[in-house]
Image (cartoon, grey):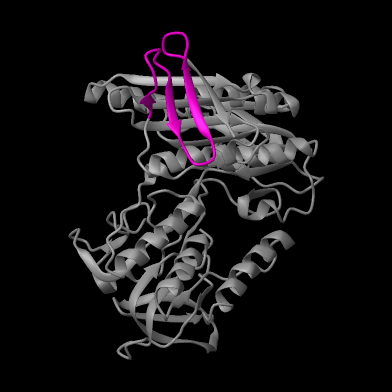
């Protein structure tokens, strides 16, 4: 497997108490590490920071974003020291770059945050050449447009790139291991998404199969070959020839080389760093390692950029002695396709299981965007919104939206869950409402198990 050097930076200022070089060292500078550093600077006077390097060949947009992250840290007094960081003990980090004797050193800190992020996960049997077989990290750097591309995986990454490729005129074939597309999404939302995002476009798909062998090709000369086997029987079912393959099978934690054994800890079998609800590092016996935290994709709790940032804030709160536990059920997710798909909380399938296990009645209220005049005015009537809640307590369990501005609308539901707002009876007719600051989601009583959901601005 091709190795990847952790190009990191250590941003440092002297410790306020003089006992350590720094008050805080953050290994890794993705969104999570960046968010933790920004918040820590607001709360304390010194931060130490160790980040992954900027990819040299990224497109201008990615380069600008990464440059802005760095400048935003420097503007508030955070110094950047380039290096690949690893633990020496729970107060010491060693950093450096392979082959560079002029770069590196060892720093101490009162607290350390591990925020090294993740890398694309590539299944066995799929060699990445970066040209005809590539991951999402390579996709934006692709210098040619394939006429036909196979996308392995139909989650967020696969859907978003299929949206881009089909808009550019490329034919797409999805290869999905499970029996349905979009695993992990609410099934009703997934069915509508398939109708809107897949069925009406030059996209076909193979479900219940594995891409067990992929042979790279040559752009415009030799096709990529893909051998498909049945997921259950493991028997060969087909061989595809396409121009390119995008591997979109999720991400894996980038935690190799952290030297966790130095503090009595180790990653799990998948490479995730074990933490408790306060983001504190746990040793092999499940006990807290003092002054060391891990946030973001590296801990695997919720592999989204904004979740990493929220975990960073939570970690800083806890290291400052202000106990804080992040409610991950309130963290929204979005798929930036056209139309967008978003959700917060659990799916209807999981909610039904929970209702059965705990003995409560599940409320489900939903509506079509065809009932929304703004959506119709913008010719975006395809879509729906659905809310799941406990009928006994009014607790909101999940909200799912597909349609115009779904990624924006979901934040109101996220805020409602985060602040403990619930569905409440308004009158004898049984109308329900969730009051929020800017919008109000109302569910009018309709057919049994259904309702009318709309947004009042």
Of the 4 image quadrants, the one containing the C terminus is: top right
Farthest front residue? 427
Q: Is residue 178 visible?
A: yes
Q: Is residue 204 left or right of residue 345?
A: right
Q: Is residue 34 above or below residue 95?
A: above
Q: Which residues are magenta?
A: 423-450
Residue found 56% across the figure and 29% down from its top: 455
- Percent x, y of residue 18: 33, 91
Quarter of the figure with residue 259: bottom left
Q: How many marks?
A: 0
What is the residue that sits farthest to the top in this orientation?
A: 447
Q: Is residue 213 visible?
A: no
Q: What residue sits 50% from the left and 70% below the top?
A: 6
| Residue nearest the viewer, comparing 147 with 185 | 185
* Vertical relation: 396 (above or below) 216: above
Give coordinates of residue 119: x percent, y percent.
51, 56
Identify the image quadrant of residue 374: top right
Is 280 left or right of 133, judged from the image as shown? left
Lateral position of residue 218 relative to residue 86, left or right = right
Q: Is residue 391 left or right of residue 129?
A: left
In this view of the protein, which residue sits in the foreground, 98 or 47?
A: 47
Residue displayed at 44% across by 66% down? 36
Along the viewing direction, whichever of 406 and 377 lies nearer the viewer = 377
Q: In the rendered view, tell whether residue 333 sits above or below residue 174.
A: below
Return the x and y of residue 113 as percentages of the image width and height.
38, 69
Measured from the top left, where is residue 217 in percent x and y? Answer: 72, 46
Q: Residue at x 39, y 39 (%)?
A: 417
Q: Is residue 26 above or below residue 271?
A: below
Q: Is residue 246 magenta?
A: no
């Amino acid at each position: 497997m091709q190795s990847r050097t952790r190009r990191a930076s250590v941003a440092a200022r002297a410790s306020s108490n003089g006992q350590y070089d720094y008050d805080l060292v953050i290994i890794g500078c993705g969104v999570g590490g960046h968010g933790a550093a920004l918040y820590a600077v607001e709360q304390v006077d010194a931060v130490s920071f160790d980040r992954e390097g900027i990819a040299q060949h990224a497109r201008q947009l990615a380069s600008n974003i990464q440059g802005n992250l760095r400048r935003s840290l420097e503007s508030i007094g955070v110094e950047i020291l380039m290096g690949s960081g690893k633990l020496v003990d729970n107060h010491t980090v060693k950093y450096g770059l392979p082959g560079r004797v002029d770069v590196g050193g060892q720093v101490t800190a009162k607290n350390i945050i591990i925020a090294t992020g993740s890398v694309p996960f590539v299944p066995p049997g799929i060699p990445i050449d970066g040209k005809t077989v590539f991951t999402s990290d390579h996709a934006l750097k692709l210098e040619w447009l394939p006429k036909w591309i196979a996308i392995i995986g139909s989650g967020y990454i696969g859907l978003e790139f299929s949206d881009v490729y089909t808009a550019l005129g490329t034919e797409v074939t999805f290869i999905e291991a499970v029996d349905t597309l979009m695993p992990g999404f609410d099934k009703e939302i997934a069915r509508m998404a398939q109708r809107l995002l897949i069925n009406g476009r030059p996209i076909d798909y193979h479900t219940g199969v594995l891409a067990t062998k992929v042979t790279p090709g040559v752009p415009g000369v030799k096709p990529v070959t893909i051998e498909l086997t049945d997921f259950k029987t493991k028997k060969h079912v087909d061989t595809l020839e396409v121009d390119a393959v995008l591997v979109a099978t999720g991400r894996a934690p980038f935690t190799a080389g952290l030297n966790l054994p130095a503090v009595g800890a180790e990653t799990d079998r998948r490479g995730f760093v074990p933490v408790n609800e306060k983001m504190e590092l746990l040793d092999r016996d499940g006990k807290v390692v003092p002054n060391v935290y891990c946030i973001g994709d590296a801990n695997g709790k919720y592999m989204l950029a904004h979740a990493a940032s929220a975990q960073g804030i939570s970690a800083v709160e806890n290291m400052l002695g202000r106990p804080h536990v992040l409610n991950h059920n309130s963290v929204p997710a979005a798929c930036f396709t056209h139309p967008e798909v978003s959700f917060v909380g659990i799916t209807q399938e999981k909610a039904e299981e929970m209702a059965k296990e705990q003995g409560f009645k599940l409320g489900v209220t939903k509506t079509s965007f065809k009932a929304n005049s703004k959506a119709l005015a913008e010719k975006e009537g395809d879509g729906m919104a659905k809310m799941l809640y406990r009928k006994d307590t009014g607790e909101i369990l999940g909200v799912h939206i597909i349609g115009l501005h779904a990624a924006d609308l979901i934040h109101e539901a996220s805020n409602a869950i985060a602040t403990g707002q619930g569905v409440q009876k308004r009158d004898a007719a049984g109308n329900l409402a969730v009051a929020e600051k800017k919008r109000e989601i109302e569910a009018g009583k309709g057919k049994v198990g259904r309702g009318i959901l709309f947004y009042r601005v």
